[in-house]
Amino acid sequence: MDTRKITEAYYSCWLGSSENLFSSSQAVTWLYATERNKVQTGYGQQFDLWALVTSDRLFLSYGDAASAKIEELKAVLDGYCPAEETAQKIQRVYGCKPQHSVKYVFRQAQTDGQAARCLRSEDYPAYECFFQKNNPDCRNVSWLREYFEEMIAENLCCGVFLDGELVSCTDSPSVPYMADMVREIGIHTLTGYRGKGYAKEACSLCIREMLKNGKCPVWSADAENTGSRILAECSGFAPFADCLFLSLVQ
């Protein structure tokens, strides 16, 4: 499996193109994309401006809400800039700081995962308890069983149990594109059990299951979430691009 090529195709879809944009040598690519005018599957808001910044190229897609100031932004962004500088220029034009995440590409499977196992249907009570401890403000879990069953059908819930309690477990958030080829990894660990390697064990097993099922793993982390970024690289991922995005429509 060529995980880089699949990852490039996936994020090209995010940018609003059916072509692999990363095959171009152009320093800055601008795209008007109707994808920016709708809420993507798995997300609660639309992203009116969505950009990827690699080590030497900038890809920026925009929708109707961002169009009024796009020429001004083009004048300010007259060439490639690193992510932080690009974010500053976007903020200067639109008056609000873009959110910043880091996208990763999978490169090599790890040998860890022996301490984790794939959850089964009979593990649902432990999973629900685990979920509620991680999400104490969530009062309605009527949807959770169906979500759980969908995930375990593909072995996407990989967890570590200690004395019968689920303390760390993966899940797989919905992806808006190429769902037949791509799976994104989510991981949660109970407070008090973090920093002990349980998340890495769970992620390593989940990645192996994804690959076994012919799916390309992807990882996304908030730029300030140092723990998630370290875990990504320990789990076999490498940085792919910085992602900057704005939601202008409330």
Image: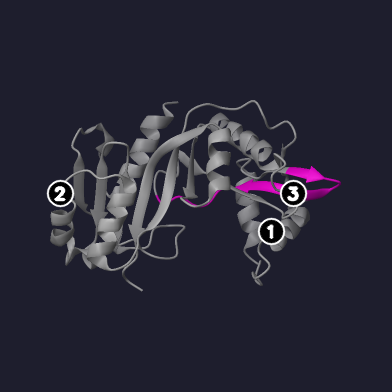
The kind of secondary structure element at disc 3 is loop
Report the front residue among 200 and 224.
224
**Quadrant in the picture for the N terminus:** top left
User: Residue at label 2?
Assistant: 78
Q: Amino acid at mark 3?
A: Tyr
Q: Amino acid at mark 1?
A: Phe
User: Residue 82 lies in magenta, yes or no?
Assistant: no
Mark number displayed over residue 131: 1
Mark number displayed over residue 193: 3
The answer to whether 124 appears left or right of 210 in the picture is right
Report the front residue among 157 and 249.
249
Q: In front of the other: label 2 or label 1? A: 2
Sequence-first disc among 3 and 1: 1
Q: Amino acid at mark 2?
A: Asp
Q: How far across and down, in percent of the image, does residue 57 sit?
A: 26, 39
**Quadrant in the picture for the C terminus:** bottom left
Magenta-colored span = 160-176
